[in-house]
């Protein structure tokens, strides 16, 4: 993402932001409340169109004007509020919306179950495709959600504070899942305020402050104090405004 700018009613929310994502990397996006993290991701997923700037994928300029454009470019957002239907099975949730009408025909179709089984096995996720989603722990909901995105061939996954609704144990399961995704070459943008998580699973971090990107650094090269300074510093500035 190059020089992405976005204003609402004359107020600049993103000011020429640059952000890059490597194949198979987990890239943390951090910043105080109101720094512009969600808005930046919404321009990547076609919720908003940027006022200016360019997005390139694999060296090609792409135009993302709506959410379908984002899907066509293999970009998927894992929403905090899950988009799954709790009373349906895992297989139904993954293949229902996209293919049920055209090729599967009915719920619980064998083909859908087999496809889901294959996908979950490939991802080494221990879920039965016939399990009803509401019978699973929230951690597995999230994995089902991610599996659904991957079934739609997503190559870039955006996770907005994914651990906020998970127990410590579920978070551990998610982290080992993220590791598998990385090895498959999936790229992840990980929005979080949790320093411990960022330092554990992310390869690089970008920090936004007042709509500008102030730092992009490899996790192994950035000190905790630098991160705190940029994030807490911005919050302090606000408190004294
Ligand atoms: P973050 O996700 O980092 O907390 P946001 O991207 O949600 O920050 O918001 C950045 C700024 O943009 C905030 O000041 C917010 O009020 C403003 N903003 C976000 N979306 C809109 C909108 N649709 N209309 C007006 N202002 C918005
Ligand atoms: Mg916010
Ligand atoms: Mg936000």
Image (cartoon, rainbow, N blue to C red):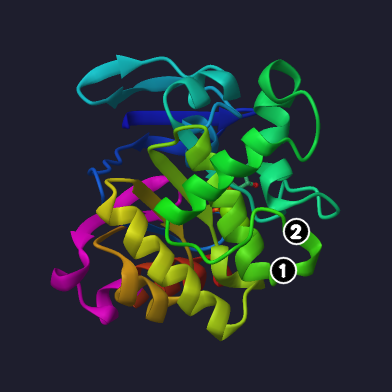
Per the image, label 2 sits on a secondary structure element best described as helix
Q: Is residue 10 above or below residue 130?
A: above
Tell which of 61 and 15 is nearer to you: 61
Image quarter of residue 100: top right
- The residue that mark 2 highlights is 133
Report the residue at 72% width, 34% height from top: 96
Quarter holding the C terminus? bottom right
Residue 6 placed where, x, y %?
A: 50, 30
Q: Is residue 69 above or below residue 166?
A: above
Residue 148 visible, this angle: no
Q: Position of residue 94 (x, y in %)?
A: 64, 41
Quickly name the residue at label 1: 136
Magenta-colored stretch includes residue 80: no
Q: Which residues are magenta?
A: 206-227
Q: Are marks 1 and 2 in contact (CB under 8 Å)?
A: yes
- Comparing 6 with 162, the one in front is 162
Q: Position of residue 67 (x, y in %)?
A: 59, 25
Outermost left residue: 221
Q: Secondary structure at mark 1?
A: loop
């Amino acid at each position: 993402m190059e020089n992405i700018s976005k204003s609402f009613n004359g107020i600049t929310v993103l000011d020429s932001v640059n952000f890059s994502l490597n194949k198979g990397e987990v890239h943390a996006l951090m910043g105080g409340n109101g720094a512009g993290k969600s808005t930046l991701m919404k321009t990547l997923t076609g919720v908003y169109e940027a006022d200016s700037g360019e997005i390139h994928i694999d060296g090609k300029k792409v135009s993302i004007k709506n959410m379908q454009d984002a899907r066509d470019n293999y970009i998927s957002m894992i929403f905090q509020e899950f988009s799954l239907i709790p009373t349906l099975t895992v297989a139904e949730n993954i293949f229902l919306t996209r293919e049920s009408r055209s090729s599967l025909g009915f719920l619980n179709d064998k083909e859908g179950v087999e496809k889901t089984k294959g996908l979950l096995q490939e991802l080494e996720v221990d879920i039965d495709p016939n399990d009803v989603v509401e019978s699973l722990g929230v951690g597995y909901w999230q994995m089902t959600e991610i599996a659904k995105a991957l079934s739609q061939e997503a190559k870039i996954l955006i996770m907005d504070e994914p651990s906020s609704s998970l127990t410590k144990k579920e978070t551990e399961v998610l982290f080992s899942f993220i590791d598998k995704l990385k090895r498959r070459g999936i790229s992840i943008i990980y929005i979080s305020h949790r320093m411990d998580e960022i330092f554990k699973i992310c390869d690089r971090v970008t920090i936004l402050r007042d709509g500008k990107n102030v730092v992009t650094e490899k996790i192994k090269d950035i000190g905790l104090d630098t991160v705190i300074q940029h994030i807490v510093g911005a919050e302090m500035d606000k408190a004294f405004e």
